[in-house]
Each structure stands twice: as C-alpha cells, then as structure tokens.
Amino acid sequence: MNIISPNYILTPDKLLKNVSVAFDKKIEKIGSIEELKKEFPNAKIIQLKENSLLMPGLINSHVHIEFSANRTQLSYGDFINWLYSVIENRDELINGCNQECMKKAIDAMLDRGITTFGAISSHAMDLDACANAKQNVVFFNELIGSQAAMADALFTDFVARLDASKSVKREGFIPGVAIHSPYSVHPILIKKALEIVKNEELKLTAHFMESEAERDWLDESKGDFSEFFKKFLNQEHNVSDAKEFLSHFNDTPTLFTHVVKSNEDELKTIKNANHTIIHCPISNRLLGNGILNIKELNEHNIPWVIATDGLSSNYKLDLFEEMKISLFTHANAPLNDFAQQLIMAATKNAAQALGLNTGEIAEGKNADMLVLDLESTPNEELATHLILHHYDISKVFINGQLEKGEL
C-alpha cells in the first residue's frame, strides 16, 4: 500500500486541496494524511513537493502505432491526396517502423501522461509492442475489405489476428475490433465481425464520415472516391450507404472516429444507439476534412472524447497538444468551460466510452495517475492552464505501479 500526498488533486468536478490518496492497484481511500496513516500504518508515504497536482492518467482512444515511421513521406492538406500518398508509400511506412520505432511512439505517449491507449491495428505488426507496453491497451483488430469475392480470405486473416491478440495475457491488455469505415468494409464482413463482438462482448470502434469524399461516395457513389475505387478495386458503386452502415451498430455501443461530415439524422442515430464520437482535431486539419461540430454534439447530448489519431496524420502523440489545438480551433466555445470539457474528454469520458475502470481520482478506480509540477497555486482556470502550458509530468502511475519518475 502507498499513500501519495500532493498539494492538489484534480477530480471530475472540483479541485481538492491538502488531501492524500491511499492506493495499491486501485485507489483505496482519499482523505487527510493523518487519517490514511492511521488506517494504513504500514503504507509507504510519497510526499510531493509544493504546488504538486495529482490528476487522472490520460486516455488516447484512437492511435495507429503501425504507421509511426511517417515524418515527411505523406501529403497533407487534402484527404484524397493524403490517401494516394499512403498507398504510394505504404511499404516504406510499414517496413520502416520496426519494433523499436513502435516502442518509441508508445514511450512518447507515456512521457506525456497517456496511461491508456486504443491501438487500431491493421496488420498486427504492433501486437508485440502493444503487448509489452507499460500502458493499458485496448487492441482494436481492424477489419477492412469492400469486395465480396475477397470476404472469406479477409475474414480469415482478421480472425487470426484477433485470436493472436486474445492470446496476450497481461493486466491491462484488452482485445477489441475495429471496422475500418462504411466505404471500405463489405456488409457481409461487418455482420460476421459484429457477431463475434456481441458473443464475446468485445470493445468496438470504426471510422465514420471523415471526409467530403466519403460523404459523396456513400450518398451517390460519386465524388473524389469514384476514380480511386475504380482504379484500385474496379468498383463503381458503394457497398452500403451511411444509414445502412450505422444500422449494423444499433445494439452495440461503438466509438466512431472523426464524424466531421455527418448529418442531423446520423447524429440522432448515434445518440439513440449510445455511441461515442472520437474527436481528432489535428488529423482533421492536416487532411483538410473540416472541424467536428462539438456544439452540435453537446446540444444532442452525444458523448465525445479526444484522441491523437496516428503519426500518419499527426506530428506527435500528445493529448495535451491535441487539447490545445482543439481549444483554439473551437474559438466560439467559452474558453474555460471548454477546457474543462477537453480534460474530461481525455480522462473520465474516455474511460466510460471504453468501459474501463479508470479516468478519475476516485475510490475504487484503478490507480492510473499523473503528478504534474505546477508553477504556482492553481485557480479556477486550472483546466485552461493545464492545456496551454507544457507542465512537467514528474511521475506516472499505471495500475498503481510507478512507470515514470522516481519516488
């Protein structure tokens, strides 16, 4: 048992002062240092320095570890140009990111306080790196393929990757399923994958309405995707529209990533089915896809979280940086209120969306915690300051274990 004694603790609804936390793998009790010492007389005391803040570990719910080799190979500014550049440089990107490359990306997330991440795995090349990560990992095995003739082969490969991830037996590693997108996965494959998801109660995610090209293709089988699908797949029509795609998920809560081009009916469907939207502002900007309408999500009471996406469409895997970009992108949102929403989106709300017992400094929650060294006494604008300033993260605890820093 340990007792950590910071000056301040950030909880979902308030800032606590001069209280301590007793924890092992989970947070056992929050109270005064005297009370905790009396209840846990053999506990190790971790006394933190002045202006120290204890807060929940961050949760990056959507990241592509396999594509972490990218720096300047890909084309930004337009989604279709980016997609062509991914195909052109695919071998270089995949072969260029070995285990050390992926470990570097995972360690960079740990350094910036990310204690849990959702890995979208296309090829399972990242399985070992994620299995050996210090963080909690939801390992989303991705299913992709829009051609019915290839369905059996693609599904066999998907199941083999899923089974390999299920063979990983370590605390904090959770297999899941990712359906790539409505334009790239045939309904036959979706139905078969969701049967597994439901039977095994796996976590589920999918890309949805990321670009104008996707909107046009799903609505009318036209637009920028027309040439792309004809050239690479000899396909002239979409395999399903957006309404049909969403209908597959009606009784399975899903994390939908991007959703910047959704319409009113689609948002109602997402709301009614208890889905969550993943906000990736840097990726959306770099690929020229527009801005997620968070005001509309809030008005519909649709839960949303924030994530970095992968280094194929980002320049770093840093949720504080992601929150900062979002804070400036949504310039009409009340600054301090929106900053608080962003902190929640990276902690408590993300944990709820993934069904994880973390994301809060609260009794009974997993002890995934960060220690930040503030420069002065925090005030009511703490959330804004956390996002704007690159505070030192001196300690990171995951499931009660110190994974960064010293005692």
Image (cartoon, rainbow, N blue to C red):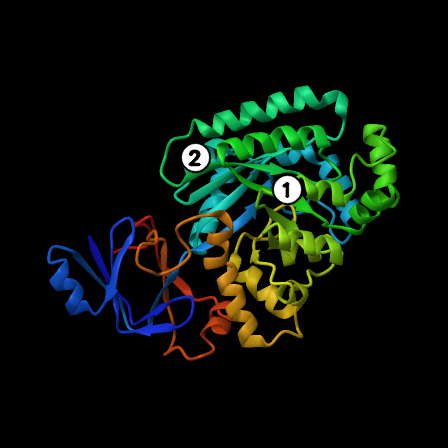
Provide residue 63's location: percent of width, then percent of height.
56, 46
Judging depth in this view, the residue of 37 and 202 nearest the camera is: 202
Q: Tell me where residue 167 sits by quadrant.
A: top left
Q: Residue at x 29, y 72 (%)?
A: 7
Q: Are marks 1 and 2 in contact (CB under 8 Å)?
A: no
Residue that carries the numbered disc 2 in the rendered image: 131
Image coords of residue 362 (percent x, y): 34, 60
**Measured along the vertical axis of the image, is residue 237 above or below residue 56?**
above
The amino acid at mark 2 is Ala
Tell me the SS state at disc 2. Answer: helix
> Marks 1 and 2, Cα distance to the nearest angstrom?
28 Å
Residue under pointer 1: 249
Q: Earlier in the sequence, mark 1 or mark 2?
A: 2
Which numbered circle lies on residue 78? none
SS at mark 1 in the image:
loop
Q: Nearer the viewer, residue 374 or 163?
A: 163
Location of residue 267 (image quadrant): bottom right
Q: Residues within 10 Å of mark 1 (few under 14, many from 20)?
A: some
Residue flagged by tag 1: what amino acid is it?
A: Phe
Vertical position of residue 352 compared to residue 170: above or below? below
